[in-house]
Amino acid sequence: MQETRTIPTREVHDAIPPIVLAIDAGTSSARALLFDSQGRQLRDIEARITYEAATSTAGAFTLDPTELTSAVAHCIDGVLTQIASLHCRISAVVIDTFWHNLIALDHTGTPLTPVLTWADTRSTTVIPLLRQQLDERAVHQRTGCIFHSSYWPAKLAWLQRTQPHIAIQAARYVSIGEYLVWQFCGAWQCSVSMASGTGIFDQNRRTWDPELLQLLHIHPEQLAPLGSGRSPAGSITSPYTQRWPALKDVPWFPATGDGACSNAGSGCTERNRVALMIGTSGAMRMCFQASTVQIPWGLWCYHLTPDYFLLGGALSNGGLLWDWMMRTFRLENNAVEKALQQIEPDSHRLTILPFLAGERSPNWNGNARAAFAGVGITTEPIHFLRAGLEAVSYRFALIYELLHPILPADTQIIASGGAILHSPLWVQMLADVLGTSVTVSAEPEATSRGAAILGLWGLHAIASPGDSTVSPQLGSCW
């Protein structure tokens, strides 16, 4: 693990209470940041711990829940140390984390498995069996999820077939979000947001899906109780009350899915604002308030809160493709953007299927792999990168095509994510391919900011996750 800390600045003294501590527990690092009542980050207050997933040629992609808990705790240590002399009182703690992960626990809460992440593909082998037993389209209409190794039905069925001793011992199944809150607060509570990404949750009824629970031999008591959306899960218990006296009696809210938080943090909580994010992976999501929703085939459906739905699609290959090509073709970072701009669209004559890590939306073919066609004697390394960015842009166009019929005429596309923000050309490509303007978000920490906004909502400091008092900044428009 590697920890990074920075020195506080005067901006802390300008913060308007209440102050929210936002914890981002990702697949490669945990971070802790502070935000004020207007959703403004307290700059230069940050702690970060990095860690690595365990992988295998069989498709494993797991994390150690104990190591991840320790990383989060050290991040909290770091932030509290930085503000110790600044008279900065924290009013709430919130967590966002990655969706679609699973941990089996025994009756004492001890993990029987590592964190099985969305990228663990070993459960692909049981998907044909699930399709034989259930109507996949009917399940999708209820849960917003198809049968895929990312989701719990495949993971649970795979555990039962390959490691039956774990299924026998398992007293509870949770995600890392519920596990973290239980570790620090001693309470089990699952947000509707985290439940919505499991694949065993009925999105419109907002409860666990009885048919899937029966098929998977899961009792409701084995799952964390569902939270109401705005109520805290609890506050820290011993020994953390001694370790963090500044957080004693401070409410902790149940963990929320990071993608949903990204929409909230970038101001995309209305039907006419679609979030387009490119980090390592990629996603296009619309978020809106409604009582029920019809879920188009090819898209997934999750929740931000019980009243806010999230519809969209995801790509496994976003910045991942960029990084792979930069490394494989030994391209220079400081020269690549200018070189890309000098190439006319499709002049390279390359066709690329950008499936280095399989395909998710819209066809969800986990066995798909990348392919390159049209390579000629004049093809240069930079041409592959240009063609790859074009290919990813067209993958987003497929998601947009499914979303478009339900979008208002005045819809804006708001782009965020480290990969895309470093390449104005890629933003322009996306605007050209989608046939609409793309506005870049000026918020560098949209996900953590979105989690903080939910904390402010839980504290009744704002009226809704889309409250105008926490509207984000927007940058350039292409």
Image (cartoon, grey):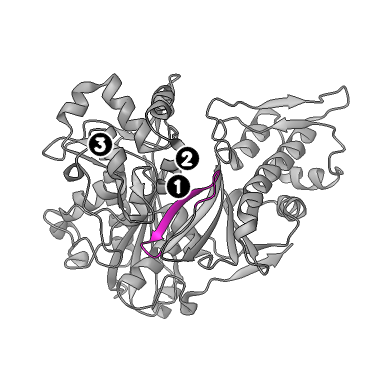
Q: Label 3 is placed on what type of residue? A: Gln
Q: Residue at x 87, y 22 (%)?
A: 377
Query: What range is drawn magenta here?
Result: 295-307
Magenta includes 306? yes
Residue 137 circle label: 2
Dot 2 surroundings within 10 Å: few (below 14), some, or many (20 or more)? some
- Pointer 3 residue: 214
* 10 Å crowding of disc 3: few (<14), some (14-19), many (20+): few
Q: Which residue is mark 1?
A: 141
Q: Is residue 125 above or below residue 171?
A: above
Q: Pointers 1 and 2 in contact (CB under 8 A)?
A: yes
Nearest to N terminus: mark 1 or mark 3: 1
Task: Tell me the amino acid under the disc marked 1.
Answer: Gln
**Magenta highlight on residue 35:** no
Alpha carbon distance from label 3 to label 2: 18 Å
Residue 356, quarter of the rendered image = top right
Image quarter in which the N terminus is found: top left
Q: Is residue 151 above or below residue 309?
A: above
Q: Which amino acid is tagged 2? A: Arg
Residue 165, given in percent of the width and then of the height, sits at: 19, 22
The span from disc 1 to disc 2 (Cα, nearest Å) is 6 Å
The answer to whether marks 1 and 3 mark residues whose Cβ atoms lie closer than 8 Å is no
Q: Position of residue 116 (x, y in %)?
A: 35, 34
Q: Nearer the viewer, residue 65 or 336?
A: 65
Of the residues under marks 3 and 2, which one precedes in the sequence? 2
Whether label 3 touches label 2, CB < 8 Å: no
